[in-house]
Image (cartoon, coloured by chain):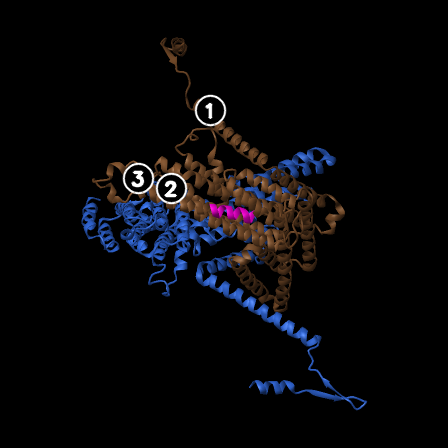
Chain colours: A brown, B blue
Amino acid sequence: MAHQEKETSGLEWRITLGDGSSKSLVPETGPISRIWMGLKGLMAGLVLKVWKFLNKAWDIGVDDPRKVIHCLKAGMALTIVSLVYFTRPLYEGVGGNAMWAVMTVVVVFENTVGATISKSLNRVIGTTLAGFLAFGVHWVASQSGQKFEPLIIGASVFLLATAATFSRFIPSVKARFDYGALIFILTFSLVAVSGYRVDKLFALAHQRISTIIIGTCLCILVTMFICPIWAGQELHALICRNMDKLAGSLDGCVEEYFDHNGELKDSDKHPDKKLLGYKCVLNSKTTEESMANFARLEPAHGRFNFKHPWQQYLKIGASMRSCAYSIEALNSCIDSENQAPEFIKKHMSNVCLKVSSNSSCVIKELAKTIKTLKKSSSIDFLVEEMSSAVQDLQNEIKSLSNLLSPAELLLPGSKETEKTTSTIHLLEVLPVVSLASLLIDISSRIQDIVKTVEELANVAEFKAEADDKAKQNQANINRIVPSQQNDDQQTMKALERV
Amino acid sequence: MAHQEKETSGLEWRITLGDGSSKSLVPETGPISRIWMGLKGLMAGLVLKVWKFLNKAWDIGVDDPRKVIHCLKAGMALTIVSLVYFTRPLYEGVGGNAMWAVMTVVVVFENTVGATISKSLNRVIGTTLAGFLAFGVHWVASQSGQKFEPLIIGASVFLLATAATFSRFIPSVKARFDYGALIFILTFSLVAVSGYRVDKLFALAHQRISTIIIGTCLCILVTMFICPIWAGQELHALICRNMDKLAGSLDGCVEEYFDHNGELKDSDKHPDKKLLGYKCVLNSKTTEESMANFARLEPAHGRFNFKHPWQQYLKIGASMRSCAYSIEALNSCIDSENQAPEFIKKHMSNVCLKVSSNSSCVIKELAKTIKTLKKSSSIDFLVEEMSSAVQDLQNEIKSLSNLLSPAELLLPGSKETEKTTSTIHLLEVLPVVSLASLLIDISSRIQDIVKTVEELANVAEFKAEADDKAKQNQANINRIVPSQQNDDQQTMKALERV
């Protein structure tokens, strides 16, 4: 094959020149073909990039179809508001200012109902306030003669723009009225300045405000009645999801730690995704805060009242984050170079796994409490279980002392030979012991989460679970903690008392 | 006094009625005075609230005067653009569309140069792109007869608005072109729809784009030439500041831990602020990312080139955050209920304090490296110092084994009485040991920070420190670690080799 190819490429065209000699024509790899090749490469790269981009977009859509629905809703709202242009009576009604309705829809339409309401309120209030103020300034300016008019208007624009811009730096204003302040500046300068030209200022303002109201009402109606996405519900679901992730990470990390050099190491489970769930908890602070801000504005929806204590969710989120920080430290134990000897790990693994599984049971139960909006009947019991597991862990650490050798025993001397096989150094125990201490820390942080969730249950007046459910739970608990047959009998009694 | 008061309040007015009897007049606490009192209370509350708000605003201004300067700049830009309205030739030049220039200034003017450039680019590109597309659609629609025209325009608005809204969900688009996508939808619908009414579409588009360019240019000029705030410089300063805070927290936490029951406990130092500095590091991810995004767009400024590797700062930030998570765990050791006995703490305090002070020295040196944009000549030495301190700590933990009692020795038996005074349980050592293990963990995370900073130094081609500076450093180091006279001689040699 190689020979044939060489022969083919050996073929050449020759041209006979005027003087009888012939000259070979080199196959053209000149500028044109090179540009062509370059272009082809560029095009291929571009197509690949676009393809990747589209693929990513497709994944996002498949991952959360509600995003696609939101986009369709946005398109619909915009198409509806465009009708204002096409229906003559409406268009005349707003005196050719239909543009403002379109602008309002584009700017105000948001993903969640709460965000849309918030932006709508901001826009309407900001516009109205600025409009009135601009009127006032305009009246004062017009009273003070032609010379001073631009001066007064210019000074007022400067002062109010400066003040409103500054207000956006104040955290409480920024959280709720950032957009309103922007609209305030915008409207004030437009009205104050354009008033110098347009005589029928009142009609203009009236039309602008009515178009804005048309736009905002349309947006609110569309977000609220067509596949609504409620900020409150989203916040609620986010907290539940994060709790499950936290529980998964905790379980996963401890399991991974004790299996690290064990039999499960190379099996095709995918630990990374589950293990790193806690990172979502670390990064969700901003989302939680904005959701809580929007949720306050939403009417009663689903199982939530208008006055549902959304702020309490932020406290729950904060306590979860505090727990996630410790899980991050726990996670770093897995990758640490210093690992305890295998037999110590084995020695400690059962009790550590018990603590982690009991802890994650508590978190899962809390997630269930929030999900169902019902007070859990078994949470006290589960917390007690966790505490007793922690107690066991502490006892186990105490008993590790038996295995530890005072250093002098290891000096070349009398008892060395008979002790070396069974004794170990503190430094060797250190990795497992610090893991254990992190687990103890985590369990105390979980109790903080329990407290914040209980507060929520009290403030939001969660109902107690039905009795038959309690029995079902009991069965679940028996399944979850199958190793402790003795304790379970106490459990039954405890549950009967509940 | 009490008697007198009682007498005064005992005083009463009596009225003689027609039938000779008299009736006491109860002092009027009727509805009017109650409303008055209520109003007074309300007003006082309102005044107090406004006063508090203004106080807070004042504090923000005093805390960062550049915010005030930004607001003045915004006011100025807006006043300048308003001049377009007052100067007749300019106003006529843009055909009465001066409004768009004002809007552009309000919306585009941002705190940092990079953010302003980013929004300007987004606005100009979004408007232009959407304008051209809308022209095309308009032409197609006008060719297809009066019946289909609104249909085609409506469908195109729906499709493009849906697509553009969806694009805002894609992270890479959201980070850079979120505002552009919004402006695209806005302009497209405005032009496509209003084209149905306004005949001189081309002139309109031309005017709109020129007003937008006037507005954006004005904004960019003002942000860039009057007390400019560069996103790059801000990012740079943020990273340096966070590093110092991290070092401060680390030092503070360990000192606080070992002083917890000690003499410094009730002194009037304010540990909280310094201790909690690491929280700033935890919460600055979003800020860092947006700053890095804006910094890419900024021209060369100060000591930074146009192609300064801002993305590397994000890596440094991430490694700092990872360190801060461990400091969070460290911080929880302080408040933990389980504290080691005082004598163990004393035993460990020196070596732990050495690790923490050496670690924080490394961080401070890194902060200096970034601050000065010069490769540090002493960083290798400092890292070695830190490692040797960690080694010492590990040795100290090993030696703790001497103090530990195997449990059997404590059983009522032979050696008990002579051992109990000097021996301790593993459980008692646990808090200090887990603190130590966290310190070891932190020192390894600091080495990650060192790596990321070194990468930055290489990519950004930092110059080496001058030799005389190295000597100065040496003097500093001698001051920082005064306790190790023996090591210092080695230090000298090491530094001479550097």
User: Which residue: 44% across, 59% down?
Assistant: B64
Furthest toward the right, the residue is B19
Identify the secondary structure beneath mark 2.
helix
How far apart are labels 1 and 2 at the CA level?
64 Å
Question: Chain under label 3?
Answer: A
Mark nearer the N terminus (1 vs 3)? 1
Circle 1 Cα neighbour tier, 10 Å, few/some/many (<14 / 14–19 / ≥20): few
Mark nearer the N terminus (2 vs 3)? 3
Check disc 3 and give the amino acid type: Thr
Q: Is residue A196 magenta?
A: no
Residue A287, given in percent of the width and then of the height, sits at 54, 48
User: Which residue: 44% across, 58% down?
Assistant: B66
Would residue B117 be visible to someone looking at this image? no
How far apart are labels 2 and 3 at the CA level?
16 Å
Quadrant of the snapshot with the C terminus of chain B: top left
* Residue B205 placement, left or right of B234: right
Residue assigned mark 2: A432
Residue B209, given in percent of the width and then of the height, sits at 57, 45
How far apart are labels 1 and 3 at the CA level?
75 Å
Question: Chain under label 2?
Answer: A
Residue assigned mark 1: A36
Residue A34 location, quadrant: top left
Numbered range of the magenta stretch = A378-388
